[in-house]
Amino acid sequence: MKIWHPFTQEKITPQPIKIVRGSGAHLFDSRGNKYVDMVSSWWVNILGHANQEIADAIHEQAITLEHVIFAGFTHEPAEKLCKALYEFLPKSLEYFFFSDNGSTAVEVALKMSYQYFRNIGDNERNIYVNLEGGYHGDTIGAMSAAGNASQYHSTFSEFFFKTFSIDFPEDDEREELAVHKLQKFLENYGSKVCALIVEPLVQGAAGMRMYSSKFLEKIVIDVRKQGILVIFDEVMTGFYRTGTMFAMDQCIEKPDIVCLSKAITGGFLPLALTVTNSAVYEAFLSDDWKKAFIHGHSYTANPLGCAAACKALQILQRADVRSNIETIAKTHCAHIRQVCSASNKRSIGTIAAFDVKSAEMARKIKNYLMENGIITRPIGRSVYLLPPYCISSEDLQRAYQSIHDFSCLGR
């Protein structure tokens, strides 16, 4: 018997480390070693591991109602979660569709936007516009939305639907060129485009590539002139990762659809939401059943996940947690510039990253940090730090000191 692990070349990857316990920002393996989880376990454990309050909320819900079919039924945890989230979202986003992971939240958004135009009688729109380098998940639609140049999904490109990729704005000059290229494309094919989908401000799986809200505003305004829907994939950027509750809070223009997942339950359970506006929702209201949004999952709006998410949202609003978020952001700003032998040093909110000369060098940094009890997971030649909000200043500074030591040792 063997477990097949994700994003892993099983032939050349060492045996996985067996984790037996978590507490706060730390993980403990079967040999008694202690690690600082500097990537929040794929960006989900924003409040650390084994948070007692979330665990208690799940327990209380589990002995009340563990699950119920969500077609034709509802329950308080789902209603409570939507009401709580609505307080933080743009008021135009008021219709909540549940699923169970980030890829599926995106898949729902893609299907929803496509069917929206069919329902209103516009049958010509079958192209999606993306930002080059984006990553939106691993289901067929989510892979397609990233475009044919995706570094992860080229194996499946023959299955992809039509897309147009906006060039990533590496600098001001390229930003203007990218906008101009988009405008030329829209002049010819704007009426064929269904939706724009982007990760706002930060492309996570591309190596924490960051771009300005100014650029995002420009492309949103341009596509809106053509009646194109706008989807923000906030699966990674949501819940204060960029310093604000959502990355879109730093933009004037708001999306028609937003996708939420990952950190929503504090890392405890799979849950996702795709939230949209009244124009989209009302296009599905009809006496014709075929115009309904025919999509669902066995565990849609699972009460345990909803209870965990409600408690996580409560904890996020506490003064001490918000203060920790600000401290992490300030620590990143102060230390990321001092990283030796690195380029493209960048940070936004609780995310910090830098590039080294090769992916091999990034792996060496990862291994050195592991030896010093710090978990990172570089993407290509990009090394990033994305800690849980409960991390101590000492642990965060120790991570930076270890990076500095590696550089100074000339490894």
Image (tube, rainbow, N blue to C red):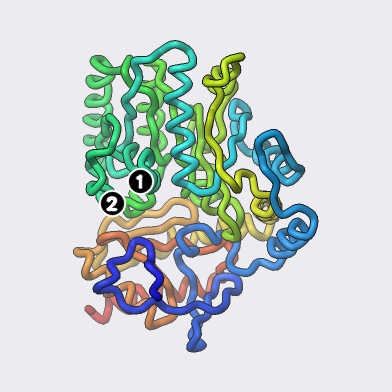
Element type where label 1 sits in the image: loop
| Residue 152 disc label | 2
From this view, report whether residue 22 is shown above or below residue 124: below
Residue type, label 1: Tyr
Contact flag, marks 2 and 1 (Cβ < 8 Å):
yes
Tell me which residue sits at (61%, 54%) in the image.
265
Tell me which residue sits at (39%, 76%) in the image.
16
Element type where label 2 sits in the image: loop
410 sits to left or right of 128: left
- Between residues 162 and 182, which one lies in front from this camera angle? 162
x then y, percent, for residue 373: 44, 80
From this view, report whether residue 396 is shown above or below residue 230: below
| Residue 352 disc label | none
Tell me which residue sits at (23%, 65%) in the image.
359
From this view, report whether residue 50 is shown above or below residue 43: below
Q: Nearer the viewer, mark 2 or mark 1?
A: 2
x then y, percent, for residue 182: 26, 25
The answer to whether residue 254 is visible is: no
* Quadrant of residue 375 within the rendered picture: bottom left
Extreme bottom residue here? 31
Extreme top residue here? 121
- Between residues 41 and 273, which one lies in front from this camera angle? 273
185 sits to left or right of 321: left
Tell me which residue sits at (49%, 29%) in the image.
255
Mark with earlier residue (2, 1): 1
Crowding around mark 1 (Cα neighbors within 10 Å: few <14, some 14 to 19, many 20+) is: many
- Between residues 15 and 179, which one lies in front from this camera angle? 15
Residue type, label 2: Tyr
- Residue that label 1 marks: 135
- Between residues 75 and 340, which one lies in front from this camera angle? 75
